[in-house]
Image (cartoon, rainbow, N blue to C red):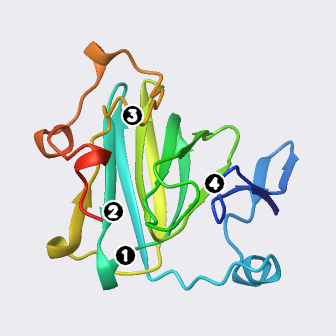
Amino acid sequence: MKFIKTEIDDVYIIEPRIFKDDRGYFFESYSDAKFKEAGLNYTFVQDNQAFSSYGTLRGLHFQKGEHAQAKLVRVIEGTVIDVAVDLRPNSKTYGKHVAVELSGENNRQLLVPRGFAHGYSVVSKTALFAYKCDNFYCKDAEGGLNFADPELKINWQVPTNDIIANERDRNFPLLKDLQK
């Protein structure tokens, strides 16, 4: 398992070691021991999965306060553009983002720490998306950031007219209007 630092502190791309033969392939998608060896101490308590079609944009979501969540995200089938936006108030990269292509072919994962908004767009026909959380979901602690905020300059790699997003995600506040 390879842990690749990104341009934002504490956000990592994780590449598994893949073993292929004539039967197919095998890889370890998560190892608590290897995470701890890399200095990443997380205790994941919930796994989630979503299936979406091309153009679906989910996000940018976060959980507030004591319900904040770190996420370890991956794609089982298909391809997404996965985005983490730094919302840590005292961070030198506040408002900056990391965007990574995750797919069932590259088997990469993105570790999104607490204090980030997270979202993804589906750029393949369909995508099966899975992620671990280090805290349980709490409806009352939901928060979001508008995925179309021009200040964020996120390239979702889906034409605006093709984006499928729910009303809630479309109406989240802009970064400048987000309460810190």
Q: Position of residue 57 (x, y in %)?
A: 33, 36
Q: Say whether disc 3 or disc 1 marks the residue closer to the N-terminus.
A: 1
The Cα–Cα distance between marks 3 and 4, rounded to whole angstroms, is 26 Å
- Label 4 crowd (10 A; few <14 / some 14-19 / many >=20): many
**Which one is nearer the viewer's eye here, 153 or 117?**
153
Check disc 2 and report the residue beneath it: 62
Residue 68 tag number: 1
Instruction: Choose the circle earlier in sequence order: 1 or 2.
Output: 2
Which quadrant, please, contains the N terminus? bottom right
Asked if 77 appears above or below 177 in the picture, the reply is: above
The residue under label 3 is 151
Task: Indicate the amino acid at tag 2.
Answer: Phe
Residue at position x 42%, y 41% in the image: 120
Alpha carbon distance from label 2 to label 3:
18 Å
Q: Quadrant of residue 33?
A: bottom right
The kind of residue tagged 4 is: Gln
Q: Looking at the image, do the residues carrying marks 3 and 4 touch, with CB atoms under 8 Å apart?
A: no
